[in-house]
């Protein structure tokens, strides 16, 4: 892997996109971009930012050229989520979970966000992807902002021994393993096992539609199978729905 480190940037995903202005996907394949802090860390939902203070988090983007031998594009984000969970488990012994499709939770709060973005090739279609990963490795010295304190957490407290650099080294190894294993169904099984939402009732936001649903299972493509329920908590119909990651958001 090729490493690029910046002390500060707007977003490592943006930095990765800028590299494509002067380099090909072949040249950039396997490039890892990290930053000490971000001024505009990107979230999956438009307008949301990932809080990225200096010295406490891992802010990185990995560029992958899509090849016939690589996993399906829709499994890249789930594989990255599994890799983050395994990294936390190995380094701390804690048990993180994945909130479908791209957030990792620890003790009921968000500890990591993953944003995968496609890059179109000159021939048409998506030729490469940028896998952005932000992890709150250590709690900031002054704590999280008031509007985030109830919803985000860190892998270790302020005085914890774990650093963003040591987290990165283990995460890169776990990413390699997860991407390779996703060609079988091992990574999908691990994603299902780490699910935070299976068996839970959630609010589904799909376009202009909002409804309550019980989450039944995660499919082999890491889609979500839900059963809509009415205001009384009864099944609204006998039919289930299959949710695709790019179309919906979930709220507990």
Image (cartoon, grey):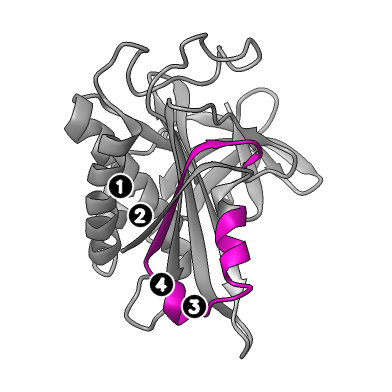
Secondary structure type for disc 1: helix
The residue singled out by tag 3 in the image is 25
Per the model, the C-alpha gap separating discs 4 and 3 is: 6 Å
Check contact, mark 1 vs mark 2: CB within 8 A: yes
Judged left or right of residue 188, residue 248 is right
Q: Position of residue 46 (x, y in %)?
A: 73, 44
Secondary structure type for disc 4: loop
Per the model, the C-alpha gap separating discs 4 and 2 is: 18 Å
Q: Is residue 234 visible?
A: yes
The answer to whether residue 60 is above or below residue 67 is: above
Q: Earlier in the sequence, mark 4 or mark 1?
A: 4
Check contact, mark 4 vs mark 1: CB within 8 A: no
* Mark drawn on residue 29: 4
In the depicted view, which residue is nearer to us: 194 or 242? Answer: 194
- Name which quarter of the figure residue 228 lies in: top right
Residue 38 in magenta stretch = yes
* Mark drawn on residue 79: 2
Per the model, the C-alpha gap separating discs 4 and 1 is: 19 Å
View extreme (right): residue: 208
Task: Single out the mark in the foreground, 4 or 1.
Answer: 4
User: Image point 66% across, 39% down: which residue?
Assistant: 40
User: Image point 29% across, 41% down: which residue?
Assistant: 193
Is disc 2 surrounded by few (<14), some (14 to 19) or many (20+) residues within 10 Å? many
In the depicted view, which residue is nearer to us: 10 or 172? Answer: 10
Check contact, mark 4 vs mark 3: CB within 8 A: yes
Q: Position of residue 129 (x, y in %)?
A: 51, 66
- Name which quarter of the figure residue 177 lies in: bottom left
* Mark drawn on residue 83: 1
The tally of labels here is 4
Residue 52 in magenta stretch = no
């Amino acid at each position: 892997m090729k490493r690029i480190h910046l002390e500060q940037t707007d977003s490592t995903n943006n930095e990765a996109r800028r590299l494509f202005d002067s380099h090909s996907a072949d040249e950039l394949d396997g490039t890892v971009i990290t930053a000490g802090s971000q001024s505009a860390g990107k979230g999956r939902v438009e307008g949301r930012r990932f809080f990225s203070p200096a010295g406490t988090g891992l802010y990185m983007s990995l560029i992958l050229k899509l090849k016939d031998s690589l996993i399906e594009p829709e499994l890249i984000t789930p594989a990255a989520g599994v890799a983050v969970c395994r990294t936390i488990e190995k380094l701390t012994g804690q048990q993180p979970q994945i909130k479908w499709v791209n957030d990792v939770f620890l003790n009921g709060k968000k500890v990591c966000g993953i944003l995968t973005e496609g890059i179109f090739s000159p021939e048409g279609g998506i030729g490469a992807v940028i896998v952005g990963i932000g992890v709150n490795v250590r709690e900031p010295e002054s704590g999280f902002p008031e509007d985030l304190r109830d919803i985000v957490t860190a892998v270790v407290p302020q005085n914890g021994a774990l650093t963003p650099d040591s987290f990165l080294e283990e995460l890169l190894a776990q990413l390699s393993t997860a991407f390779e294993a996703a060609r079988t169904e091992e990574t999908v099984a691990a994603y299902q096992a780490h699910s935070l939402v299976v068996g839970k009732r959630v609010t589904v936001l799909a376009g202009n539609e909002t409804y309550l649903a019980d989450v039944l299972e995660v499919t082999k493509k890491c889609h979500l199978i839900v059963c809509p329920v009415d205001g009384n908590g009864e099944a609204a119909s006998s039919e289930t729905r299959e949710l695709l990651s790019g179309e919906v958001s979930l709220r507990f």
